[in-house]
Amino acid sequence: MKVLVVDNDNLIRDGLLKMIKKYCPQVTAIYEATGVEDGINKIASVEPDIVFLDVEMNDGTGFDLLKKIENYNFSLIFITAYNKYAVTAFKYSAIDFLEKPIEPTELILSINKAIENLKNKALKKQIQILEESLNVVQSQNKEFKQIALNDGKVIHFIKISDIIYCEADGAYTTFYLSSKKSILISKNLKEFEDLLCDFGFYRTHHAILANLSKVEQIIKGDNATLCLEGGHSVPVSTRKKESIFKLLES
């Protein structure tokens, strides 16, 4: 298992190299690059299995590097110092990332996920979504177009406007889509609530996150229900009724 770390910050790079040696026995060879051009050359010569890539470097960005590579025959982990709003963009793309300063436990998780994703053929599309999402964050425009959902076997690229609602099932979340398809993701509903709450999604019930633009009918009463596009219906909890009805009626 060969790893390449591309980062112009000597302290970050050296610290990451030491942590990989200490905590990741699966890694048999570690290489380093100091920037975009050096990284391009090392990827060509080393052919790494996993690339840790800084977003901002002295001679360009991680995206500049990726645009100059034809084949993504590696798993990608971004290293970022972005703030919490830009981190949302990474979550939309389902590309793994580590926030500086890097914690050993997060590094171990990222390495394990990267090994599982070595045969990922969708990385180019994920990078496109990530770059678009970062541009949206930087312009303070909240119109994200797509979200990448990794079900463990396939990465699905979904328009947010096609999501009707999300339903919790323990540590899992099921997405119900306009195409009548459903996708089961091994992440809890709270994580998706944080991503989608600014885009018309509302927690109607402890297990339901609904796209309020898909509401076709409101059934009031003791068992309040929202009737959604596609014949779906979802419950509204007693404590949520007043706020949701006011929101919809306005």
Image (cartoon, helix red, strand yellow):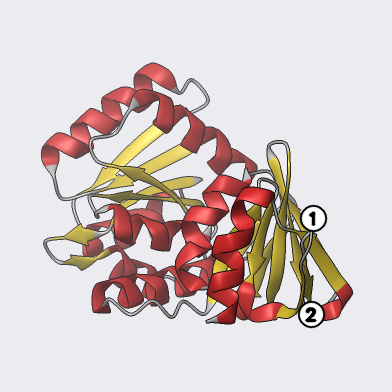
| Amino acid type of the residue that numbered disc 2 sits on in the rendered structure | Glu
Q: Find out whether the residues at labels 1 and 2 contact each other: C-beta distance under 8 Å.
A: no
Q: In this view, which residue lies farthest toward the top?
A: 22
Task: Mark yes or no: residue 1 visible.
Answer: no
Locate residue 98: give its quadrant. Answer: top left
Viewer-proximal residue, 142 or 237? 237
Secondary element at tag 2: helix
Please state which of the two labelled residues, at mark 1 or mark 2, is closer to the viewer.
1
Viewer-proximal residue, 139 or 247? 247
Could you tell me how far apart the alpha carbons at marks 1 and 2 are, in whole angstroms? 22 Å
In this rendering, is residue 209 above or below 191? below
| Amino acid type of the residue that numbered disc 1 sits on in the rendered structure | Asp
Q: Residues within 10 Å of mark 2 (few under 14, many from 20)?
A: some
Q: Which residue is mark 2?
A: 229
Label 1 vs 2, first from the N-terminus: 1
Q: What x and y, as percent, mark residue 124?
A: 53, 70
In this rendering, is residue 170 above or below 119? above
